[in-house]
Amino acid sequence: MSEEVPLSAPEITEEDILAVTAAMRSGRLSIGPYQEAFEREVATLTDRLEGVACSSGTAGLHMLLLAMGVGPGDEVITTPFSFIASSNCILYVGAKPVFVDIESKSLNMDPSQIEAKITPKTKAILAVETFGNPEHMETYRRIADKYEIRLIEDCCEGLGGSWRGRPIGGFGHAGVFGFYPNKQITTGEGGMIVTDDERLASVCRSLRNQGRATDGGGGLKNWMRFERLGYNYRMSELQAALGLSQVRRLEQVVERRQAVARRYMERFLDNHDVILPTVSQETVMSWFVFVLRLSDQYTAEERDRIIEGMHRHEVGAAPYFPCIHLQPVYREMFGYKEGDFPIAERVCQRTIAVPFYTTLTAKDQDFAAATFDLMLSRENIRRT
Ligand SMILES: Cc1ncc(COP(=O)(O)O)c(C=O)c1O
């Protein structure tokens, strides 16, 4: 579906194209210097010792759970309000996602509800920085350390943000970034694990490459020796070259995304029908998406009609995110029903992601905002 003002759009510069072309000309298309340089760049940016590039954010999360020894019979505490991958990866390893409802400002897991969900089976907390918001990460880490379990930071949506000066990706025992085209930077498809734990990084490097033996430092000791069941979760040199080119202008990208977010904030400040994203004083957001929430008097059906109306006017919009526990696959597996996580449900029925990307012009943004206003006013007219 191509729209006049799309929901998201990657920024690909001439420099990016030259970087990918150079990688193609190098003759080395996988496992090479671009990957290493990209890993070093992201690790440095997030104050981490290790970066492990991989084929997607989902692959990174899957490998981390495996490398941490999470498996059948184990429980992992996580959020029901996220993109489904953050929970699916727990199912991949045969463990059970144990959902904790969210708090309604940051939209992250409510820290006060976590300890009650910890059992002897709990192996990890998989915390998502929802829409890139790092609020409560430090508290989750404190809880994880108290119970001697791992904190996995699903920071797929947060590259370039920080909390009290600490970069996103630096709170968990390990974190995972995602580089799908709607993210702050993209490699087309791709992801990266960041951690200070060298052993964990080494196991993940082996897992991404069919379980091949590594020399501990990440190099491959023996090409045809397979120490564990591994996968092909590698990132190609073309992707790494694009990622490297993109990440080098991250600061600029973040500034531009902040400017776009600010324009939306100003535009909707006096609109009492919408709830704007809440960002604490301590947080620097790099803005993955811009999500408006309709106030509680609106129903999910009204929200859906507003989204459809925006599509009719060639403006991107999406319900980010539907609750994970209410998806058919989770209902069938675990018997979840409406009412199980009331705050997440109240939020997810009323969210609308509106066009948001680094290169969004003020003119297109105005058009998107005006279209939203028009669709909202139609719902109000229907009511009266
Ligand atoms: C919170 C979260 N976790 C995991 C993922 C999965 O990343 P990928 O699409 O790269 O597999 C995403 C992707 O959008 C995400 O937003």
Image (spheres, rainbow, N blue to C red):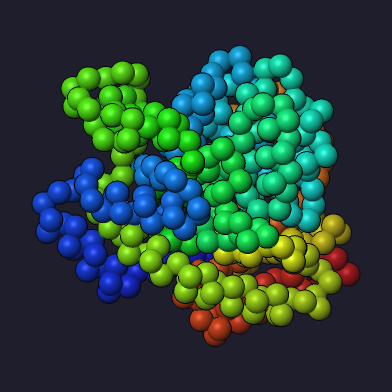
Residue drawn at (19%, 57%), measured in percent from left and top? 23
- The image shows residue 154 at horizontal and vertical percentages of 56, 44
**Along the line of sight, the residue nearer the viewer: 215 or 119:** 215
Q: 209 left or right of 196?
A: left
Query: Quarter holding the N terminus?
Result: bottom left
Most extreme residue toward the right, as rendered?
Answer: 384
Q: Give the number of marks.
A: 0
Nearer the observer, 304 or 83:
83
In this rendering, the answer to whether 92 lies above or below 269 is: above
Q: Is residue 342 left or right of residue 221?
A: right
Q: Residue furthest bottom?
A: 363
Q: Quadrant of residue 345?
A: top right
| Residue sitting at x 30%, y 54% | 37
Residue occupying image coordinates x 29% and y 49%: 35
Left or right relative to 65: residue 303: right
* Residue 203 versus residue 273 in the image, above or below: above
Visible in this render: residue 33? Answer: yes
- The one nearer the camera, 278 or 3, is 278
Task: Classify residue 336 by image quadrant.
Answer: top right
| Residue closest to the eye, 263 or 321 | 263
Q: Residue at x 61, y 14 (%)?
A: 73
Residue 351, percent from left and from top: 70, 57
x%, y% of residue 369?
Answer: 65, 76
Q: Name the spot of residue 324 as percent of width and height, x first.
A: 64, 38
Residue 304 visible (yes or no): no
Quadrant of the rendering where the C terminus is positioned: bottom right
Q: From this view, report whether residue 383 is shown above or below residue 105.
A: below
